Image (cartoon, rainbow, N blue to C red):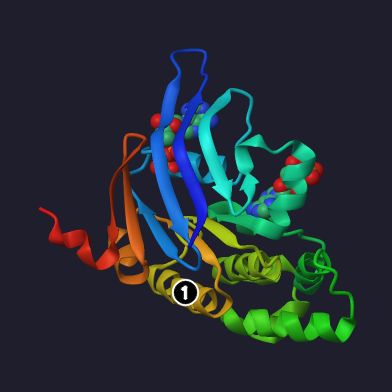
Amino acid sequence: DTLLSIRELNVGYLNPGPTVRAVRDVSLDVREGELLGLAGESGCGKSTLAFAVTRLLDPPGAVLGGSVRLAEHDLLGLSPEELRRVRWKEFSLVFQASMNVLNPVLKVREQVYDAMQAHGVTNRQQLDARARELFDLVGIQASYLDAYPHQLSGGMKQRVVIAIALALEPKLIVMDEPTTALDVVVQRQILQEINDVRRRLGISIIFITHDLSLLVEMSDRVAIMYAGEVVELAPAHQLYAHP
Ligand code: ADP
Ligand code: ADP
């Protein structure tokens, strides 16, 4: 079944100069539980699409046209209040700089607990058990729960952010180059772990990277953008069958 349905999405940036049309007439469905890879060269509009879909792109000047539906929600039509409610429950975004949004003065544990408390889990034992489970899923030792962010490496911090995104239990996680700052071995490892969790929890993921080979290996389907448009959409194993 379809979870996310993007129709005729258009996003432009109203610069002092001519409007940059960053996303052009994009229509795309993401199925329940699917890992959809999104690739394309730098500047082709991947991040703009990610931010538009998660409604974290509302800088003055960004104009949206078209529709984005997630389950029963019309995402582009939501008021800021509705958006705030839906966001945590239904979808979240992890991007390259997400590790920087960790609060430097709070232990990692508190930040993971906050995400779970947003879902009404308040029992300390349950919080602890669930936090350990999540850390196990993303490949971090539970002892790091009591670390402060600055005591962790970049890869660890990004894993923590992914654990927090999972703790929010959304239906969809959009990951925009979440591991690009990390070395290739760590990237692959994290993506494998994300893929495991996705299968277990039935979460849909849009995974954005310029590394096409990584996507072909990990995704169910791969979409390729060029100059703001989706120019290719195919099951990962069929991608190289095209001329
Ligand atoms: P990608 O993620 O594929 O690298 P982006 O979505 O970041 O692509 O960028 C798509 C296009 O939109 C590019 O031409 C980029 O220069 C332009 N762009 C991105 N952000 C802004 C912005 N805040 N203001 C104006 N133009 C932007
Ligand atoms: P607020 O307007 O609530 O003070 P912000 O303007 O910083 O907060 O962000 C808008 C909303 O988006 C907030 O509810 C915030 O928690 C949420 N948010 C920010 N980043 C993400 C993310 N990566 N995934 C999901 N929700 C996010």
Taking the view exactly as shown, the residue that stands out farthest to the right is: 123
Determine the secondary structure under disc 1: helix
Q: Amino acid at mark 1?
A: Asn
Q: Is mark 1 within 8 Å of ligand 2?
A: no
Q: Is residue 56 visible?
A: no
Above-or-below relation of 41 to 60: below
In front: 44, or 28? Answer: 28
Marker count (numbered) = 1
> Which residue is pictured at 50% across the width and 68% down the height?
33
Taking the view exactly as shown, the residue that stands out farthest to the top is: 17
Q: Residues within 10 Å of mark 1 (few under 14, many from 20)?
A: some
Residue carrying label 1: 195
> Which residue is pictured at 58% across the width and 65% down the height?
158
Quadrant of residue 135 within the rendered picture: bottom right
Taking the view exactly as shown, the residue that stands out farthest to the left is: 243
Above-or-below relation of 157 to 86: below
Does residue 106 appear to the left or right of 21 in the view shown? Answer: right
Q: Position of residue 186 (x, y in %)?
A: 45, 73
Q: Is residue 227 visible?
A: yes
Quadrant of residue 227 within the rendered picture: top left
Above-or-below relation of 242 to 140: above
Quadrant holding ligand 1? Answer: top left
In front: 76, or 167? Answer: 76
Q: Position of residue 225 (x, y in %)?
A: 33, 44
> Which residue is pictured at 81% across the width and 63% down the height?
118
Q: Position of residue 90 (x, y in %)?
A: 66, 57
Q: Position of residue 104 (x, y in %)?
A: 76, 60
